[in-house]
Image (cartoon, coloured by chain):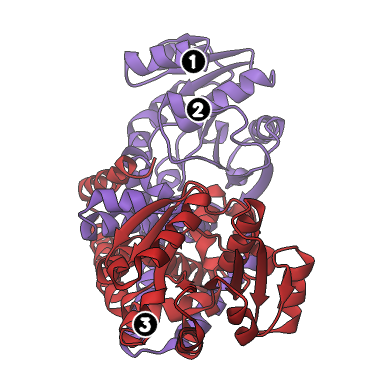
Chain colours: A purple, B red
Amino acid sequence: MNIAVIGVGLIGGSLAISLKENGFADKIIGVGRTEKSMDKALALGLIDEKTDLNTAVDQSDLVILAVPMSAYDKLLPEILDQVNDKQVVIEVGSTKAAFLKKIATHKNRHRFVATHPMAGTEYSGPEAAIDGLFDEKCCVLCDTEESDADAVALVERMYKSLNMKLVYLNSEAHDTHAAYVSHISHISSFALALTVLEKEKEEDRIFELASGGFASTVRLAKSSPAMWAPIFMENRYNVLDVLYEMIFQLKKMKQMLIDHDEDGFYELIEKANEIKKIIK
Amino acid sequence: MNIAVIGVGLIGGSLAISLKENGFADKIIGVGRTEKSMDKALALGLIDEKTDLNTAVDQSDLVILAVPMSAYDKLLPEILDQVNDKQVVIEVGSTKAAFLKKIATHKNRHRFVATHPMAGTEYSGPEAAIDGLFDEKCCVLCDTEESDADAVALVERMYKSLNMKLVYLNSEAHDTHAAYVSHISHISSFALALTVLEKEKEEDRIFELASGGFASTVRLAKSSPAMWAPIFMENRYNVLDVLYEMIFQLKKMKQMLIDHDEDGFYELIEKANEIKKIIK
């Protein structure tokens, strides 16, 4: 099968290399925003050839859109306009409901499947792509009743070939859960980085004193603005909802510090410890 | 050399096993709050014998106090009362200025050295102790001018035997930097755990959808309340200062979401990315 990967970064590149490695794809055709990144993807062996969007779509059985969500408005209708009833189009973005509304009435909506392979690292670009990124991770398929059965079946085969666990959610529920679990982690990490950079002017000190705990908590703050700013905007009602809660929790801690309420803080930490039941 | 370890948990136990392994200690005498934890420490080979506080101090060249900071008021004067001019006492807590003021005029203050080996995990108790925890990490020695030169020299030899990098700070500066780098990471992680536990009532969903990013950001939220509630209280002025900044950063993000200010959010993330320069 020929697969077009539009956007050969962390997610697109990792899908490309993994689907080549496991034999699901016979040929990967790459499309990117710059010649430079495409040449890098070729040199890294992520893609077999590079071309323009229309040629890539024309030559492919499956089209994977893996660009920042801010580029969906331009690219997604253009791709859908072009596909026939044997081709399948998917995207791999982190929020669903808003853009799905925009393509709801497109004549080829039924050849499209919205997916969210929940894996990643804090790095971006073709160099960040790794084989095995998706192994044993979870992939959400959204609103599959809007897609043709054969299109859904193809996508299921593809993600299962990567050893992913499939979860089915409607797009609204997906966006809520993604805000609660993934998006707020990034918000929290960005805020931590900004806080420490603001308060700790002595960079040498951060470097010396930061132990593994800080590095782990702040890791996601290295994530790409091109990827994350559009995600937060797309999902802003859900992100706002969970962000209000986070600010509320921090204010509660602040008040306990002001009140010197050690018992209250102890109880709060004990409650936070319940996350152990969920994250091993 | 005989070393008494008072409190054989994550830090005390890891020091015990590491100093035994590298030959710095000939004998480790353990003291704990419960018989059960001491028996566990013996069974795990962390300590050579268990006894009561006074006997342990009496038989030791070096006393390591590694208990939650809430127990300092009771234990530290009792230990200092008992030591002679050849013995050395250290503690390994996460904040310094407040308790150091309390013992400033103790007749044996000069035999005492305040230290902060900046290493740890989110686990606690004797089972959490591991050899090699301190390797290549940083250890802060505070207000060393208040301690006898031979006492400081012994402590330097001990931490260097564990391959730690030594940093010298006054206690006020230590507490500020510790708040900025270590304490706020824990606050942020506890708040994230509480937020997600509050919003995400469907625990199965968290479990399914949480990827590596969430696990990494929320890891410190598993940390022990017995250890951390007293630290936050001891260092509450510095922690409050940095907590105000964190709430300010989150409110800024909130406003940008409300305003749909994607460019602003992009710039904020770009600024947060500067943490890359510091944390590799």
Quadrant of the image containing the C terminus of chain B: top left
Q: Mark 1 lies on which chain?
A: A
| Residue A278 percent coordinates (x, y) | 64, 63
Q: Mark 2 lies on which chain?
A: A
Near-viewer residue (A164 or B226): B226
- Label 1 – label 3 distance at C-alpha: 56 Å
| Residue corresponding to mark 2 | A129
Q: Nearer the viewer, mark 2 or mark 3?
A: 3
Relative vertical location of residue B68 with respect to residue A21 in this rendering, above or below: below
Image disc number at residue A44:
1
Q: Is mark 3 on a helix, strand or loop?
A: helix
- Give the amino acid at mark 2: Ala
- The answer to whether the residue labelled 2 contacts the one labelled 1, judged by CB atoms less than 8 Å apart, is yes
Relative vertical location of residue B262 with respect to residue A134 in this rendering, above or below: below
Near-viewer residue (A18 or B29): B29
Residue at x 61%, y 84% (from the top left corner): B53
- Label 2 – label 1 distance at C-alpha: 9 Å
Q: Is mark 1 on a helix, strand or loop?
A: loop
Residue at x 42%, y 70% (from the top left corner): B94
- Give the amino acid at mark 3: Phe
Q: Which of marks 2 and 1 is nearer the N terminus?
A: 1
Q: Nearer the viewer, mark 1 or mark 3?
A: 3
Q: Mark 3 lies on which chain?
A: B
| Residue A86 percent coordinates (x, y) | 61, 21
| Residue corresponding to mark 3 | B99
